[in-house]
Amino acid sequence: MNNTGAGGELWSINNVHSLSRYSHGPISSMTAGERRQTLNAIAQSGDGFVVTAAGVAVIDLIGPMMRNPGGFACLMGFAGSRQIAASVSLAAMDPDVKSIVLRIDSPGGAVDGTPELASAVRAARDVKPIIAQIDGIATSAAYWVASQATQIIASQPLDLVASIGVRMAIVDISEANKRDGVRVEIIDTGELKSTGDPNRAITEADIQHVQSLVDEAFSHFASAVREGRSMSEADFKLVSDGRIMFAESGLVSGLIDEIQPMSVTIGDLTGSTQAARRSARSRRTTASAAADSMRMRRETDILPV
């Protein structure tokens, strides 16, 4: 979850089925009927998306994110980043799909798999409008993904966004083992090979190593958000301390573009996909100006009296 870590894995928190079994070949060479058959088969499997009569593909990113959640994780509501990336790419290539809505209700999740999904969204954005529609929460890794869309739209003012950051927790139960009379002998091949093993006392070298991993992952996160949202370094610093924001604050900070129900978003896309692109550029300019104003207010607040 947001602000929840697990030993041994980087989190920015929140089972892939092969598409080949549905496909008759490259989608560009399919007939319209074959494409529709492919899309319907994927949708029926629960792993794809639905397409409205007007050509708007709706893809869900719901739940904590993992690259390839297994059966138990799927039952627990985890979202498969790799499968969702495949769905986004398929929708981007399908000429019958005019625009895409990525519906997000996720606190984030594992870093593993997030860059690939974010890249798929960014690539789709270069082909057709793709809207990240927040339906509850899009924080941490889920916001990383959303930031690559043409627009980010929250469904209502109290939707949650941001929590931009990466964390990793390591646990030490070695003292508890001693009290319980349990002896664990760790045999490894290097000073850092057993970093994160809870049966081993945490060393300063462990902490420095884990911090370097967190920092490296965050650098990728930060670069993606700054580029995807066209944010300056100064504006990004205002929102990159890990805090969660309601959508209204996110709008002022330039993290999202609009607050409106998903039905309105789909209606806008149906009316004019080009208008959606122009609207995104206009709203980002307005949001950037608002962020400048907010930064000036903060700087004024800390000036000596």
Image (tube, grey):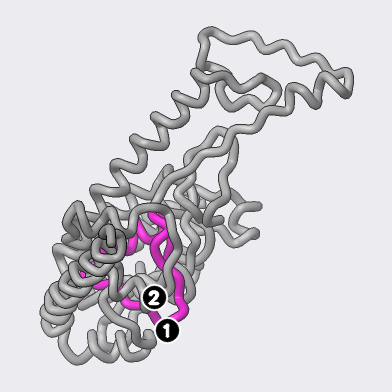
Whether residue 257 is situated above or below residue 241 in the rendered picture: below
Q: Which residues are magenta?
A: 138-164
Determine if residue 269 is in view. yes
- Classify residue 118 as left or right of residue 155: left
Determine if residue 31 is in view. no
**What is the three-letter code of the residue carrying label 1?**
Gln
Whether residue 252 is situated above or below residue 149 in the rendered picture: below
| Of the pair 202 and 32, the residue shown nearer to us | 202
Which residue occupies 81% across, 23% down? 177
Task: From the top left corner, tell me how far across and down residue 304 is, in percent.
Answer: 27, 58
Identify the mark at residue 247; answer none if there is no mark.
2
Q: Nearer the viewer, mark 1 or mark 2?
A: 2
Few, some or many residues within 10 Å of mark 1 (<14, 14–19, 20+): some
- Classify residue 72 as left or right of residue 134: right
Task: From the top left corner, tell me how far across and down residue 63 is, in percent.
Answer: 53, 63
Q: Is residue 87 magenta?
A: no
Task: From the top left corner, tell me how far across and down residue 66 is, in percent.
Answer: 49, 50
Task: From the top left corner, tell me how far across and down residue 285 is, in percent.
Answer: 13, 73
- Is tag 1's residue or tag 2's residue first in the polypeptide sequence? 1
| Of the pair 262 and 45, the residue shown nearer to us | 262
Q: Give the spatial CA distance, label 1 vs label 2.
A: 7 Å
Residue 170 image-quadrant placement: top right
Q: Secondary structure at mark 1?
A: loop
Whether residue 58 is situated above or below residue 220 in the rendered picture: below
> Do callouts 1 and 2 mark residues in contact (Cβ within 8 Å)?
yes
Residue 175 image-quadrant placement: top right
- The residue that mark 1 highlights is 156
- Tell me the quarter of the image containing the N terminus: bottom right
Q: Is residue 139 magenta?
A: yes
- Tell me the quarter of the image containing the C terminus: bottom left
**What is the three-letter code of the residue carrying label 2?**
Ala
